[in-house]
Image (cartoon, rainbow, N blue to C red):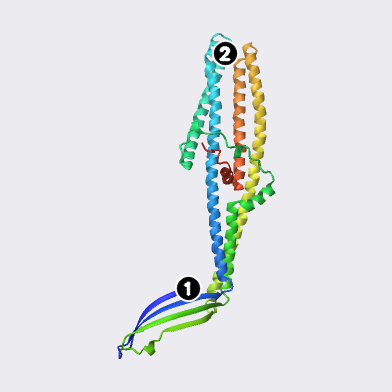
Amino acid sequence: MTSEVARAYEKGSTRTTEDNVKNQIMLNYRILDFGVRDQLIDESNNEWSSANYIYLDRESEIAGKVTKSFLTVNKQKELLDIIQNELSYYHDRLHDFEYLVKSGESTESDLKKIQASIDSLNVQKINVNEKLDDELNTLNIYTNDRISRNNLTSVPSAISKYRFNMDGEAFLSLILKQNSKVLSADKKIDAAKAEYIASKDKFFPTVDFQAGYTDNTPSNDSDIDDYKDEFRVGVKVGWNIFNGFKDVSDANKRRDMLNKTLADRDDLLKEVTLKIKSNAAQYRSGIESLKLANQSCRNARDLTSLYEQEFKIGQKSLLDLVTSRSELFRACSEIIESQYQVYTANLDQMLLGDMLIKTINENENENVYR
């Protein structure tokens, strides 16, 4: 529906002094357009829904970045703890080891091996500290908070206890129902379809109801009968005759846009399917590595305990003891790496299924980030 208000001043011919002020109001209401208006409304609603899903996807993406940063910080902190624990072990016993070398019970090369292990651990400590500080800065930027090494909590149960879905087809069906990026693509297709249908419907006639009122205010020397107020009511039928080529071109353009949105959604589904498979492989690898790392750690701990006992009675050398400690440290590091690989796989699947924000909201009492 459209309305128009106009005011005009009419001057009579040069031979007369008549003039008139004309006030007009016009109302047009489209009665029939063969669906063009409805399709355009549908297009607008779908565009709005698509934009809303894009916003939700962006919100989920930011939450994912914050959570991944949080996991990285915790991982580096755990690595730093075992490095510091290993350094403390060597520092506490370094004087005793030096005494054994001086007394001839151990060789100088054994002591050099210990020093090399300490140097290697110090290098790892520097690198881990650097990564930890960088990730803490990133986390503080995202959260605008004062998060430090001292106020970090453990990994939230929403991630550590998440049950990974290994059924790829079932999880894909879930994604199609609730992933914001996929839903946004669906709404874009609906909007493009509505726009294309509306462009084709322009070839059909339109019917408008029209009503208008004209108020004339002539000058005093004018004949009032010549300037009577007018009220008009009618129906206007419009048919697209001379604008056909332009509308055909516009319809073809809308059709191409629809085909592009369909192709974009197909590409998105291929990308999602690939992520599902990659994510499952990452989780499977992490679980298997974690199992082996735990087994290796138990064996290395038992071996180190035996070597310490045998070292005390002279059955094992200092080098044997240091080597067993290195194996234990390596196994403990692999446990941390594998465990956080599983956590990351859990998080990635939660992001694919748009479950992270919902899970965070359901666990408001659990402070996730500090």
* Vertical position of residue 101 compared to residue 366: above or below: above
The residue at the point 44 percent across, 75 percent down is: 4
* Vertical position of residue 115 compared to residue 203: above or below: above
**Number of on-image labels:** 2
In percent of width and height, residue 90 lies at: 54, 19
Foreground: disc 2 or disc 1? 1
* Residue type pointed to by label 2: Thr
Q: Quadrant of residue 97?
A: top right
In percent of width and height, residue 349 lies at: 62, 44
Q: Identify the residue position indicated by label 2 in the image.
A: 107
Q: Is residue 337 visible?
A: yes
In percent of width and height, residue 319 lies at: 60, 17
| Element carrying mark 1 | strand
The residue at the point 54 percent across, 27 percent down is: 81
Q: Which mark sits nearer the N-terminus, 2 or 1?
A: 1
The residue at the point 56 percent across, 46 percent down is: 357
326 and 332: which is toward the camera: 332
In the rendered structure, the answer to whether residue 115 lies left or right of residue 224 reads right
* Vertical position of residue 210 compared to residue 191: above or below: below
125 and 54: which is toward the camera: 54
